Amino acid sequence: MAKTRTLLVLVAVLFGVLVTPASAEVRYRVLIQNSYTRKCLDVRDWSKENLAPVVQFDCHGGANQQWTLNTQTGIVTNAHSGKCLEIIGWVTGNGGHAVQYDCHYGANQLWNINLSGGLLVNRHSQKFLFVLGNRTDNLAPVGQWDYMSSGPAVHWNIG
């Protein structure tokens, strides 16, 4: 009887290990390039400070332009600073600016990440990451806007 129980436990453990799904968490370390302007999401001046603005800048591949995307949690982290992309002040309206801040996993730091469509949607505001004003210049601010009225600068090449 003890052998049977041991065998059943062993089979259950083995079966559980074999059928346990792999974690859905997927992380990518990428450049995020605006499809319209061809400039990259960039932490201004290589800052490691909280509230440093996130802007667009010519792509150079530096660590301040590298981001880790966690598609399960929705966290987007800058490789240089280790801080998270967020919309400042929990703003829910159009024009809220993107900054970096210590990761606290609040909804203003969580993003629905659509890799194939090149869209990042803030979970708190339900607005899209966007180069404000559809500007094409270096250091143009990045923020959030409604999809329907945002214009072409809402799509990103992620990868």
Image (cartoon, grey):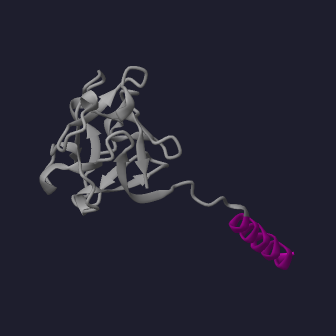
x, y percentage for residue 47? 13, 54
Q: Along the horizontal axis of the image, is 13 left or right of 42?
A: right
Q: Along the horizontal axis of the image, is 46 left or right of 41?
A: left
**Is residue 5 on the magenta stretch?**
yes
**Is residue 122 on the magenta stretch?**
no
Compare residues 62 and 52 and report the one nearer the observer: 62
x, y percentage for residue 32? 36, 50
Residue at 72% x, 67% y is: 18
Picture quarter with the N terminus: bottom right
Picture quarter with the C terminus: bottom left
Compare residues 112 and 116 and report the one nearer the observer: 116
Q: From the image, give the main secondary structure of the stretch colored magenta.
A: helix
Compare residues 149 and 73 and report the one nearer the observer: 149
Q: Along the horizontal axis of the image, is 42 left or right of 75?
A: left
Q: Is residue 103 visible in this depiction of the protein? A: no
Residue at 22% x, 46% y is: 100
Location of residue 152 by image quarter: top left
Q: Is residue 77 visible in this depiction of the protein? A: yes
x, y percentage for residue 66? 31, 58
Magenta stretch: give its range: 1-18
- The correct choice, above or below, for 101 with respect to 124 in the image is below
x, y percentage for residue 117? 51, 40
Compare residues 62 and 93 and report the one nearer the observer: 62
Location of residue 64 by image quarter: bottom left
Residue at 29% x, 45% y is: 85
